[in-house]
Image (cartoon, helix red, strand yellow):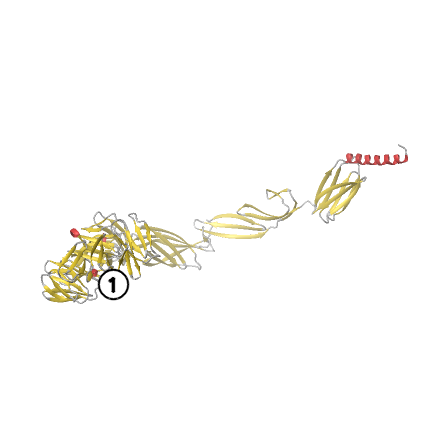
Amino acid sequence: MTLPYFILYQKLNIPEIINCWFDNYENNKINLVCNTVEQPLITIEKDKINISSGRWIFRKGNVLISIDQDGKEKVIRDDSNNYVIDYISLGDNEIYPIYLKNKKYLFSGNEYEKYVVYLDKKILIDRNKINIFLRNKTIELEKGKQYYLSKNYISIVYEEGTKVIDNAGNVLNFKIQGKYLGFNEIYGDIFKTEQGVIFSSRKGVIGICVDESYLIGEMQGGLVILCGDKLKYYYNTGWREIERHVESELSVNLSSNLLGILRSNNELHIYDINFNELIKFENVHSFILDYKRFYLLSSDKVIAIGFLVENYNPIKVINNNNTVKSPITLQIDETYLYNLTVEKGKVIEIKTLENRSKLVLIEPYEFKKGSLNIVIGNKYFKLIQNIPYESEVSNIEFKDLRLLVSNNNGRVIGHVDKNGLLLGTIKYRIPTRSPIEFLIIIYDNMYKYEVTDNNSDIILNIPLKLSKTIIGKIPMRLEVYINQRMIESLEYLVPVITVNNNKKCNIIKRKIINNSSIREIITKRNNIFEWEEIFEYPEEYQGILVVREGDIIEIEGEKIKINKGFNLIKITKSENYSREYVILGVENPIREVHIEYKANLLNIKLNIDNNVPFEVFYGPHSYRGISRGVNEISLPIEPTYSLIKVRAIAHGFKWEANYTFNSLYYSLLIAKNHAELLKGSLLSFGIV
């Protein structure tokens, strides 16, 4: 079996908008040429890609983009508002636009009638001359009758002969009129005339092709020529059609012993010298053949270099026996690991070796004798191989399984809704490196264990909820999963043991007080189960209190300062004691006391809440009544008494307010006023 041996597989950092293709270069090197205004020199020599330090400059619409060596992109020229159709670099670090105006092409101040682009070749033609721009070189020649372009040559036909320009910019002169197809040691220089006659300088006329013609090369003494979309082979005066529907000369290439044809679906077919197909590659955008080597380029700029080898196998089986200690192990060429899938198995690890291979550790889905379909490859080539394998089988055992079930509504300690406990051991040995999931199912109970050890024991201690009385044995199902795939399903009848709340149980009593409810709980408990008896009865308590605002009272041992209005107080002494109290903070009904003096009377103004009984004391005088809001009381002034006491009764609480003033001062002031009045009266009678 012939398989490709890849000696290089590398992605280049070239924008996908740029179109590139392979070309032969000097000194047996391969060149990568792109449809850019400027590009670094990219050459491939043996198994190494060399990229010069040049910059990338390319068109994106009517905008010129530059990418430096650091990959930074910037706009260096924007001609969105101009009629620019292309740009040309003349190798002087300047880039010149080509304008199209009034059906004329304008470039560097000159006017041209025609502009032609083919791959990396650009030609401007005026009435008298033709300017050729080729790989930073400018060649100016007289205008000819016809011109032809191919990947390797430009042919300009004159009356006296043909000038041929190769990719290096050399100008060759021939006395033959026609398109220059190329040179061959056997056939010499090969031309095709305007009438379609193909002839060589050493063999004469060899055929006719009225369509575009391209010389692909020599194979076994014959010529491979593309005529239109038909690939033909000329040998010993006869023609043989090899392939139809070939898109362009870039779709065909050959070496001394290989022929490659790239079809429209990006499939590259390689043939030997007898035109027998050897191999097929996928996703190929451009290619070239050099002796036994092939060079491949994808649209996303991945380059692969290799050659075809008979009896070559990129997979070497290191271990095909899957056990607890070691998985299936394959040694695979790293260039085939860009596309790796395993049917009926899983890749668990890839280890790098010192050579160009890697160790791939694989675990089968089924732990028994079988085979794995391994798909390896890369962007261009895929290989499917069937690898037979042996495997240690899974071993799962149960030990001392039993189900303890409580009677009389008992429950598992710490699990209020569980009344059964599954105990025992699962011993297992499974040849896997992946996490293992054990799923235990008993009636509606499902319990999951996840482990990473492939050879160990699982100690079971699983609380269960059992809705009915169980006697004898109960069915249990065990399902084992690896990578969400069930590898085992086992069933087992588990013996049932009933546990009673006998006298050996410990007894715990506790009381829970919640407001007016008292609950006494008696718990009987062994090492696994507990049984509860609950007694509940009411106990009234005074939960509504009326207290004066601002007073500090003590409730349940806590001191609380009372605010006016309703206060909701919750007393929590522990998780088993909680009571609520509503406390009404009664506000002082006496709002304000104010006095005024009128003659020899003391006018007292009282602001007291409505319907509150109150009394006033001043010296030998007193007053009692029911408040109507603002109350006015008049009492004689007593010089020897300076204290007014107001007392009110509200919500059963007594409130007092004292008002102190200088009664002697105001009494003397009144006496003075009276004396002055008396003096005035006496003067009017002439007594004083």
Residue furthest to the front in view is 128
Give the image location of residue 310, x and y in percent.
15, 57
Which residue is at the front of the view, 73 or 543?
73
Give the image location of residue 570, x and y in percent.
58, 47
Give the image location of residue 509, x and y in percent.
52, 48
- The answer to whether 532 appears left or right of 545 in the picture is left
The quadrant of the image that shows the C terminus is: top right
The quadrant of the image that shows the N terminus is: bottom left
| Quarter of the figure with residue 553 | top right
At label 1, the amino acid type is Asn
| Quarter of the figure with residue 237 | bottom left
Crowding near pointer 1: few (<14 within 10 Å), some, many (20+)? few
User: Is residue 431 visible to us here?
Assistant: no
- The answer to whether 88 appears left or right of 213 in the picture is right
Which residue is at the front of the view, 100 or 500?
100
User: Is residue 238 visible to us here?
Assistant: yes
Label 1, secondary structure: give it: loop
Residue at image location 11% in from the left, 65% down from the top: 205
Which residue is at the front of the view, 86 or 236?
86
Residue furthest to the top in view is 688
The residue beneath circle 1 is 265
Give the image location of residue 565, x and y in percent.
64, 48
Tally the numbered discs: 1
- The answer to whether 565 appears left or right of 15 in the picture is right
| Quarter of the figure with residue 251 | bottom left
- The answer to whether 168 appears left or right of 71 in the picture is left
